[in-house]
Amino acid sequence: MEDSTSLRVRYAETDAMGWVYYANYFTYFEVGRTEMIRRSWRSYSDLEHEGYRLPVIESHCRYFHGARYDDQLDIQTRLTLPTALRLHFEYRVVRVNDGKLLAEGFTVHCFLGESGKPVPVPAELRMLVTA
Amino acid sequence: MEDSTSLRVRYAETDAMGWVYYANYFTYFEVGRTEMIRRSWRSYSDLEHEGYRLPVIESHCRYFHGARYDDQLDIQTRLTLPTALRLHFEYRVVRVNDGKLLAEGFTVHCFLGESGKPVPVPAELRMLVTA
Amino acid sequence: MEDSTSLRVRYAETDAMGWVYYANYFTYFEVGRTEMIRRSWRSYSDLEHEGYRLPVIESHCRYFHGARYDDQLDIQTRLTLPTALRLHFEYRVVRVNDGKLLAEGFTVHCFLGESGKPVPVPAELRMLVTA
Amino acid sequence: MEDSTSLRVRYAETDAMGWVYYANYFTYFEVGRTEMIRRSWRSYSDLEHEGYRLPVIESHCRYFHGARYDDQLDIQTRLTLPTALRLHFEYRVVRVNDGKLLAEGFTVHCFLGESGKPVPVPAELRMLVTA
């Protein structure tokens, strides 16, 4: 399952070096996976209302070039399901202006059910991802 | 009721202008009121466990000089209770290094009880503040 | 000069009370004024390249209802020039879903020139605002 | 080179799940490495004044248990120099209250000199680290 969404760098997200602060790429990753899930399946806030949570259990990012204030960024997101209990999102952050790859990374999540305990990835999502 | 707590500016809190991003002073204000309440009365997390919430209903800040990365800041906090239903916190952000006043502001809060509805400020806190 | 831009609440912007953290409304205000300036005049990043800065010297917000994760918000922004040296932005944060006014506030800015000293608001912007 | 510093979770750092937002662990990592460098060698802001920058080129975190608002956290930091051009920081985030390991991760940095180009890790730091 793949998708792409775009956003603009806010002043709040830059730091005194003049670039986007490194932790904020993980917020961009959140935007990427939220929009991908929404368009492909349903909104994450709906999932929360049904009692699900998708906490992050691992995160990683490589930084190639710094993003600047007001840069328009394309967040390319891909979801795979390596096991019945894991979601693996991969991200590429590309500057729209010149097509440069600024960063890439991944996050690993599990599905928590209403009890707050891990549950298998819902069959409905599994079908969409492997389709 | 007055108190003072100190903190250091993190890189994450600066922006591309080289100073602390203006919204982050409100996070410093949070640190100020949290520590004042903790030392004078009890921790805000204890209050939450008892079912209380203190949402902000108004906030204000004036900026005189920018804080820089790694600056040590003194957050001076004062609490007054203008009415039975309102907490009024005033803050002064002073750079420890040279005693310069960088910003000052206030936040107004109400007390929500377990029902999620406004309740009067607890008598125990009222006594501490007016003492 | 008036404009409106819309955004979605990110998970990163919420807090443990389940609503958007109060300081983050000031980041939404930034998005509002950035987009208004871009559409009406030119991008703030262009202004920075010409050596200008618009630091905030005062900020204020009133909170009526909390925004939740994934809420779509309309940031309505209005710029006035009370004096030759001041920009005054007013903001209204409206939830798109039900048209509810969640918060309103303002920020006051000055114009810094290349020397880092205050300069009058450029005539070009003044004409646009009073037009 | 090893060090440990402690901090308290701010409300601003939590999210609607009730835990610290995953990206904010990287801000805690920043606090850990800043304090370690300051105590062992000199302040990072001094390094910046000398024209150095230490941008992050890779970051990683595993999350075991969520930190809550007001938790006191111990950020344990270790620096190694795998090559002449790389700094490798490892972090462990431990809750002071019960000694539980909440998260662990690493960041990789390079040294940029005044020209903005990569330079070898200064001999002075190299001696401290390998001592």
Image (spheres, coloured by chain):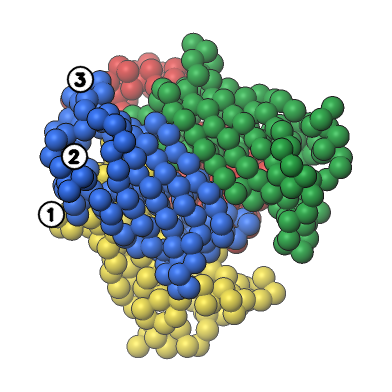
Chain colours: A red, B blue, C green, D yellow
Q: Position of residue B94 (x, y in %)?
A: 44, 63
Query: Which quadrant of the rendered structure holds the C terminus of chain C?
Result: top right
Front tag of 2 and 3: 2
Callout 3 crowding tier (Cα within 10 Å): few <14, some 14–19, many ≥20: few
Q: What's the CA distance linking mark 1 and mark 2?
A: 34 Å
Q: How many marks?
A: 3
Chain at tag 1: D
Q: Amino acid at mark 1?
A: Asp
Q: Relative to residue B33, is residue C131 depicted above or below? A: above
Kind of residue at badge 2: Arg
Q: Nearer the viewer, mark 3 or mark 1?
A: 3
Q: Which quarter of the rendered picture does the N terminus of chain C lie within?
A: top right
Q: To which chain does the residue with label 3 belong?
A: B
Q: How busy is the neighbourhood of tag 1: few (under 14 within 10 Å), some, or many (20 plus)?
A: few
Q: Which residue is mark 1?
A: D98
Residue positioned 29% across, 67% down in the render: D5
Instruction: Give percent across and percent down for residue B16.
Output: 62, 55
Chain-order first, disc 2 or disc 3: 3
Give a yes or no on whether discs 2 and 3 share a subunit: yes
Q: Residue at x 36, y 78 (%)?
A: D39
The residues bearing labels 2 and 3 have C-alpha atoms spaced at a distance of 21 Å
Q: Which residue is mark 2?
A: B126
Secondary structure, mark 3, is: loop
Q: Nearer the viewer, residue A118 or C101?
A: C101
Q: Which residue is mark 3?
A: B115
Of residues D66 and D80, which is closer to you in this image? D66
